[in-house]
Image (tube, rainbow, N blue to C red):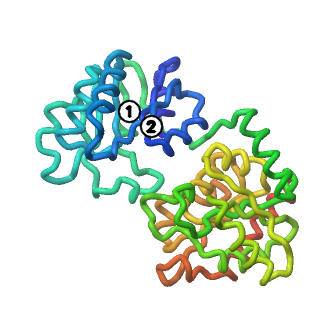
Amino acid sequence: MIKVIVCVRYPGVQVDVLAADRGKQTYELNKNVRWANVYDPDDEWPEPAEYTDMVGLLKNRYYDMVLSTKLAGLGHAAFLFMTTARDRVSYIYPNVNAAGAGLLLSQTFTPDSMNLSEGGYNMYHQMADWLGRPFRSVPRHPVPPLRVSISRKLKEVVAGKCMNAGVEKGKYIVIHGIESDSKASMQSRGDTDSLLPIEVWAQIAKDIRGFKPLFVIPHEKERENVEEVFEDLTGEDPNIVFITTPGQLAALINDSAGVIATNTAAIQLANAREKPSIGLFCSEQKGKLFIPNAEEKNCAIVSSKTGKLKDIDVDAVKQAMQIFDVSLALV
């Protein structure tokens, strides 16, 4: 969101990104990113050599602006200050830990809570509003809808995986959000209750008509469990694909007929690629936070009535599957 506003408002600008090792994978979807460097901003005690090396790297690139979505205290503010960028913009702690940070930053934003991700889709609304503000002769820029680009190489890799999984382009529904301890689950940091046991997923998948359900697993250790549960319930072999990166997931969704997912990256990628989708949430409030204006995005929201995702009403999900029938009729 932030990078899109910058690139729309300032055509030709070059954007570089610092992110954790898994976060870096996200930026293969953004054609506006020049370089993506691995550096974990959440590491409270970084190695001195790594810290000074990164400061030197950023300083030598002569940036006009540094934006940080990490909550800054004095330490992180000092890191941004040492880059010598003209403008240093960051969120700061909403408590006493922010003391002194504002002295080293050009612009600060104070969030409502310690976890920005709890704000859902518009978690960075303060920074987005500031970046898009009218300035001199440049008018205000609204936040554009989320869009992602997919490289030809990614499409070819995913096409091979789909072939091995036994599904054809446009004839499968992506199932994403299987309960796992893998970091590749891609669940939201703002919603800890966002993964479903395979037993519930199997109940949902057996009711899909006209398309093949394609189970996305974040780790190969989950394959045997998915096969066992689905075969016991339906007597059929499940279609399974092993996907660990946002880029491959986006390519998989792009070739699908639609998505059924919990609050993971899959539901946002389905909206970005304009695919019909069903989002499963632990509460109605979470659904509204993470998928605002769901109907406009061709997304059906199904929320649990108990506040626990595992208690999701399978019959309600089955009724929501009509969204795929409508989309098929429009093709």
Give coordinates of residue 129: x percent, y percent.
37, 39
Secondary structure type for disc 2? helix
Q: What amino acid does circle 1 point to?
A: Leu
Q: Earlier in the sequence, mark 1 or mark 2?
A: 2
From the image, tell me which residue sits under label 2: 2
Residue plotted at (72% across, 64% down): 215
From the image, tell me which residue sits under label 1: 131
99 vs 240, nearest the viewer: 240
Q: How many numbered marks are there? A: 2
* Left or right: residue 1 compared with residue 70: right
247 vs 314, nearest the viewer: 247
Q: CA distance from mark 1 to mark 2?
A: 8 Å
**Residue 285, disc:** none
Res 73 → quadrant: top left
The vertical placement of 222 against 49, above or below, is: below
Residue plotted at (42% across, 31% down): 140
Give coordinates of residue 171: x percent, y percent.
86, 57
Q: Are marks 1 and 2 in contact (CB under 8 Å)?
A: yes
Local crowd at mark 1 within 10 Å, few (<14), some, or many (≥20)?
some
Local crowd at mark 2 within 10 Å, few (<14), some, or many (≥20)?
some
The vertical placement of 296 against 43, above or below, is: below
The vertical placement of 208 against 147, above or below, is: below
* Left or right: residue 312 compared with residue 6: right
Camera-near label (1 vs 2) is: 2
Residue plotted at (65% across, 75% down): 198
Q: What amino acid does circle 2 point to?
A: Ile
Give coordinates of residue 107: x percent, y percent.
24, 33
* Left or right: residue 283 compared with residue 173: left
260 vs 300, nearest the viewer: 260
Residue plotted at (44% across, 50% down): 122
Secondary structure type for disc 1? helix
